């Protein structure tokens, strides 16, 4: 298949993924409502904590900064589709064997299917986030560099999160039930990426460890308030790019070895 036909095929994958999102608008609206409720609860909790502590800032970090940071992390979660389940099920059921001779890459196909809904999801969840936070909790002071860094941190973060899920799913080639692996990595991600506690108010040593962790790098958008210069933004983007290349390398190796196992064992 030539390049033009491949691009057309992959574009169709993205289009189908987008259509699936709007095929059930009630489900999409329900998720937006739950997201609004979740970030509202975070906002109430952190506003209460700051008020009770008698402090307006923690290391220069306000309650409004904390709420926005947590909400931005949630946007990454909401925009990333769980490609883990899709790949795992196809491997364990043996369906992947029927796709090995298809005129496209199974890994690229699953990746595009996973991120195909991201643009529409981002617009929806970002709009809800902005509306809820501005209405009930206020607007933090964004610098120009923070506003500039917002979108690239989101894009690279979404790509890396999807790749992480793909790599975990490929463990199904060797593990009969990879769900525990997914469960452990998910809970570990919650700890290191600022899902519940903004990393900016945690000790510097913890943040340093988090900076170099592939499970936390997808969520650097939630650390936007730590970016005070172009070098800060460059550091976060570079870490994301490095992990994207590393994870892609391991996906390539795992997939090549995995499909060899399928060929030998007949699925």
Image (cartoon, grey):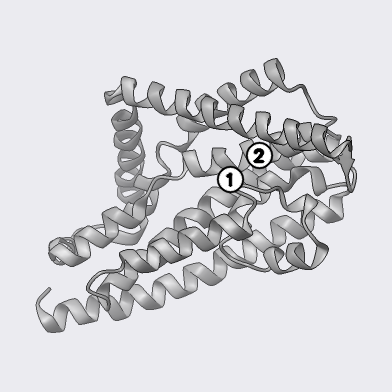
Location of the C terminus by quadrant is bottom left
Which secondary structure, mark 1? helix
Please tell me how crowded label 2 is: few (under 14), some (14-19), or many (20+) other residues with Cα within 10 Å: few
> Any mark on residue 151, and which?
2
Image vertical order of residue 115 relative to residue 24, above or below: below
197 relative to 93 in the view: left or right: right
Q: Which residue is mark 1?
A: 155
Please tell me how crowded label 1 is: few (under 14), some (14-19), or many (20+) other residues with Cα within 10 Å: some
Image vertical order of residue 56 relative to residue 244, above or below: above
152 relative to 47 in the view: left or right: left
Q: Residue furthest front?
A: 52
Residue at image coords 63%, 61%: 241
Image vertical order of residue 133 relative to residue 102, above or below: above
Residue 141, image quadrant: top right
How far apart are labels 2 and 1 at the CA level? Answer: 6 Å
228 relative to 101 in the view: left or right: right
Location of the N terminus by quadrant is bottom left
Q: Residue furthest top?
A: 135
Residue at image coords 50%, 55%: 161
Q: Do we see residue 213 in this rendering?
A: yes
Q: Residue furthest bottom?
A: 264
> Any mark on residue 70, and which?
none
Residue at image coords 62%, 55%: 193
Residue at image coords 30%, 48%: 5
Which secondary structure, mark 2? helix
Locate residue 157, reporting x and y percent. 58, 51
Locate residue 235, reporting x and y percent. 77, 60
Q: Do we see residue 3 in this rendering?
A: no
Q: Are marks 2 and 1 in contact (CB under 8 Å)?
A: yes
Q: Which of the two residues, 172 or 106, is positioned nearer the viewer here? A: 172
Q: Which of the two residues, 51 or 167, is positioned nearer the viewer here? A: 51
């Amino acid at each position: 298949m030539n390049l033009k036909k491949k691009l057309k095929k992959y574009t169709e994958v993205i289009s189908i993924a987008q259509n699936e999102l709007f095929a059930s608008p009630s489900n999409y609206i329900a998720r937006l409502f739950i997201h609004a409720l979740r970030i509202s609860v975070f906002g109430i909790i952190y506003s209460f904590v700051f008020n009770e502590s008698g402090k307006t800032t923690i290391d220069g970090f306000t309650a409004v900064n904390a709420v926005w940071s947590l909400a931005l992390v949630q946007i990454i979660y909401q925009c990333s589709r769980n490609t883990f389940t899709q790949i795992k099920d196809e491997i364990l059921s043996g369906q992947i064997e029927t796709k090995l001779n298809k005129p496209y890459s199974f890994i690229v196909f699953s990746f595009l299917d996973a991120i195909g809904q991201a643009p529409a999801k981002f617009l929806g969840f970002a709009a809800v986030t902005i509306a809820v936070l501005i209405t009930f909790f206020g607007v933090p002071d964004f610098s120009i560099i923070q506003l500039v860094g917002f979108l690239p941190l989101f894009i690279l973060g979404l790509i890396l999160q999807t790749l992480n899920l793909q790599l975990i799913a490929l463990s199904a080639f060797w593990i009969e039930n990879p769900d525990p692996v997914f469960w452990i990595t998910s809970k570990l991600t919650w700890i290191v990426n600022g899902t519940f506690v903004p990393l900016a108010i945690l000790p510097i040593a913890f943040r340093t460890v988090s900076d170099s962790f592939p499970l936390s790098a997808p969520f650097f958008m939630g650390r936007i308030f730590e970016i005070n210069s172009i070098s800060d933004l460059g550091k976060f983007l570079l870490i994301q790019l490095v992990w994207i290349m590393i994870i892609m390398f391991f996906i390539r190796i795992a997939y090549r070895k995995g499909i060899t196992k399928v060929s030998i064992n007949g699925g």
